[in-house]
Amino acid sequence: MPDTQAAAPSFLPFFLAASLALAGGFADAASFVLLGVFSGHLTGNSILSGISIVEGSFTQLWAILTAVGGFVSGTVSGVLWRRRIGTARGMALPLALEIIVVGVGVLAYENLDASLRDYGLALCLSLALGLQNGVYATVGTSKVHTTYITGVTTSLLNTLFYGPEQSAAKRHDRGMFATVLCSFVLGGAAGAFLTYHHGVLGVFGLMAPLLIAMPLCCRFFSRP
């Protein structure tokens, strides 16, 4: 992929990261409210799988494993995409794919048999977040993840101890980590609210930050 990020206006990385993190938090909260699983959080799903085994809730366990498989598959696909596609449109296309996959997940939940619909939605949401996680591993000069915030929170806390003579890159990192953290929490609140009150149709709200991210992504990864 060509190094075009340095030429982008300084505000673009933060807006792009914020929109991606909004989507990440939204999807994670929505999947937990509707399905009791996380769509982008392997640590949480590992704990939930252990609880399901102890409780003998194997139907829930299969939903969790479906989400884990979807996220891992999406991440691998995203990494391969990022390494092979170097154009601005190519970097924005995964966002369009996310929207399509999310839409398929909602339709599957609405139309599949009750015994299968949870698996369909879990697979689609986790696949979408995995794709996002693999493609957008770096925003600007900062390595961030917009689908979970454990590492981002740790990185943000580390920046508090850089000392008074910080480089511009370190200050950029601090701002980026804080942006992702706040946006993820805000997206999670929105996802929980919409799905709690509107059910699976609330998942369509996830498309808003993804649609916002698409033109930002095109601009960010384009050559001057």
Image: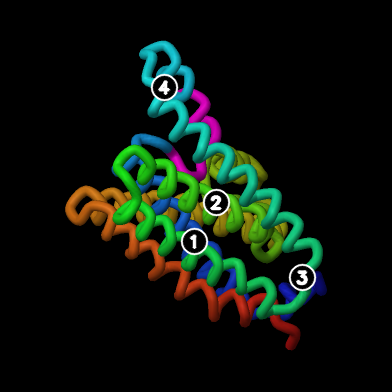
Front label number (4 vs 3)? 4
Q: Residue 53 lies in what quarter of the image?
A: top left
Residue at the disc numbered 3: 85
For label 1, the SS is helix
Compare residues 56 and 126 and report the one nearer the observer: 56
Q: Residue at x 74, y 78 (%)?
A: 87
Three-letter residue code for mark 3: Ile
Circles 3 and 1: CB distance less than 8 Å? no
| Res 127 label | 2
CA separation in Å, label 3 and label 2: 19 Å
CA separation in Å, label 4 and label 2: 21 Å
Asked whether, in this view, residue 38 is left or right of residue 46, the answer is: left
Quadrant where the N terminus sits is: bottom right
Residue at the disc numbered 4: 58
CA separation in Å, label 1 and label 4: 26 Å
For label 4, the SS is helix
Q: Position of residue 179 (x, y in %)?
A: 49, 58
> Does residue 134 belong to the magenta stretch?
no
Circles 2 and 1: CB distance less than 8 Å? yes
Q: What range is drawn magenta here?
A: 38-47
Front label number (3 vs 1)? 1
The kind of secondary structure the magenta stretch mainly shows is helix
Compare residues 113 and 15 and report the one nearer the observer: 113
CA separation in Å, label 3 and label 1: 20 Å
